[in-house]
Image (cartoon, rainbow, N blue to C red):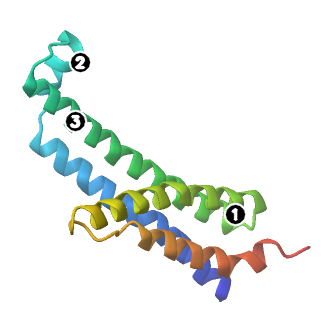
Amino acid sequence: MQFKIGVSLLILAGAIPTFIGTRGYIRFLSRHPWERWYDVLVLGQKTQKNSNDVILMLLQVAYSNLMLTGFTLMGLAYFGIRNRIRWTWYLFILGAWPGLNDFVATLWRYVNDDGGFFPVPIFPVLIGAVGLILTRKEVFKTP
């Protein structure tokens, strides 16, 4: 029972960034049509408007990276941890790095800008840490 709860928490830890990244990516694409990127990427025109577009394009890349991290963590949990493959447990710890990095960045902004977003990225990391603790005993049990 403890192992199943741990695997479920690990899948949830990957589902949260996947949902947030997908939502942000879809909202981004609905507000910023692709025709605007043609001047920046193909023609290489450098204007103030295009500089802002480059910043927006980097935001799109951040959303896609968030989705990829979430999908990777869900895949590791579902196919690796659930089947008690030891090396996936270690990879899952490495997958916590983007969440910790995002947490530090948002915490820095939260403290220095007197508000803004509360450091929400810590929640999937904490959920994943609890899941890893719950699954450790079963994954590393000697056959």
**Residue 54, image x, y percentages:** 21, 30
Residue that mark 2 sits on: 41
Left or right side of 86 for 10: left
Question: Counting other residues with Cα less than 10 Å from the Cα at mark 3, is it few (<14), some (14-19), or many (20 or more)?
Answer: few
- N-terminal of the pair, mark 1 or mark 3, is 3
Image position of 83 with respect to 40: above or below? below
Q: Residue furthest bottom?
A: 1
Residue that mark 3 sits on: 55
Left or right side of 86 for 132: left
Residue that mark 1 sits on: 89
Disc 1/disc 3 C-alpha distance (Å):
36 Å
Considering depth in this image, is 101 or 40 the residue closer to the camera?
101
Which amino acid, mark 3?
Ile
**Residue 109, image x, y percentages:** 29, 60
Question: Counting other residues with Cα less than 10 Å from the Cα at mark 1, is it few (<14), some (14-19), or many (20 or more)?
Answer: many
Number of marks in the rendered image: 3
Q: Quadrant of residue 103?
A: bottom left
Tell me the residue at 33%/39% (across/down): 61
Image position of 32 with respect to 71: above or below? above
**Residue 82, image x, y percentages:** 66, 69
